[in-house]
Image (cartoon, rainbow, N blue to C red):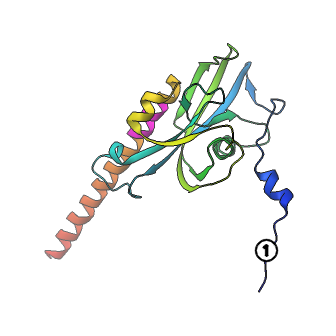
Amino acid sequence: MATALVSQENVVASLVSRTGRHLQRYDKGRRQVVGCIPYRYKNGSSNTSEVEDELEVLVISSQKGKGMLFPKGGWELDETIKQAASRETYEEAGVKGNVEHQLGHWTFQSRTHGTDYDGYLFPLHVKEVLDFWPEKNNRQRKWMSVEEARESCQHGWMKEALVVLVDRLAGRQQLGEEEMGSCSSSYQAKSNL
């Protein structure tokens, strides 16, 4: 029986967040910030009449401990925008999954630095919730309903992105129901022949 050996250095290295801004992307002087809205369905399926009732999103505490937000951070020169969004979500929230199509682009002012940033958010359909992740000791994470997240999220641009996500998922569900309706109509028509 073969046994896979994992060195302690590899485990520790994967639990360290990237730090510093020397590799960060800037556009017209604005720091490029990317992140995700991690989501899942309470019953494990999106087949419900009301997406918002079954949808849960994962929020994290701010490092400064003031309010909740979605995971986000700097987009670095050596990664694609989706890689950066996935990495930030792993480092800050300890989840992995499928990064989907961008929700939008917002320009916002950093409360700490008083400068404008460009923010990009993506949905991340969560497939794995980790017990250990790089910022586990610095942040709290919490699954919330959409309404709870709207109330607790401290950034207006992130709340706007949440509305876009809910609308998109509701549209997907409606499209799926319409396709199912046309499939059963087609089946019914064929069975009447």
Q: Give the residue at x 24% y 59%.
A: 181
Q: Which residues are magenta?
A: 161-167
Residue 78 vs residue 113, the one in the foreground: 113
Q: Position of residue 167 (x, y in %)?
A: 38, 38
Q: Nearer the viewer, residue 73 or 6?
A: 6
The quadrant in which residue 184 appears is bottom left
The image quarter containing residue 138 is: top right
Kindly identify the residue that appears in the image at 65 percent across and 41 percent down: 92
- List x then y, in percent, for residue 32: 69, 28
Image point 42% across, 28% down: which residue? 151
The x and y percentages for residue 111 are: 63, 17
Which residue is farthest top?
A: 114
Could you tell whether 92 is left or right of 146 in the image?
Answer: right
From the viewer's perspective, tell me whether residue 45 is left or right of residue 180: right
Q: Quadrant of residue 116?
A: top right
Residue identifier under label 1: 4
Q: Position of residue 33 (x, y in %)?
A: 66, 30
Q: Residue at x 50, y 23 (%)?
A: 156
Q: Nearer the viewer, residue 173 or 139?
A: 139
Q: Is residue 163 magenta?
A: yes
Q: Residues within 10 Å of mark 1 (few under 14, many from 20)?
A: few
Secondary structure found at label 1: loop
Q: Amino acid at mark 1?
A: Ala
The reply, left or right, for residue 114 in relation to residue 122 is right
Residue 163 versus residue 96 in the image, above or below: above
Q: In which quadrant is the N terminus drawn?
A: bottom right
Compared to residue 83, the image places residue 107 above or below, namely above
Main SS type for the magenta part? Answer: helix
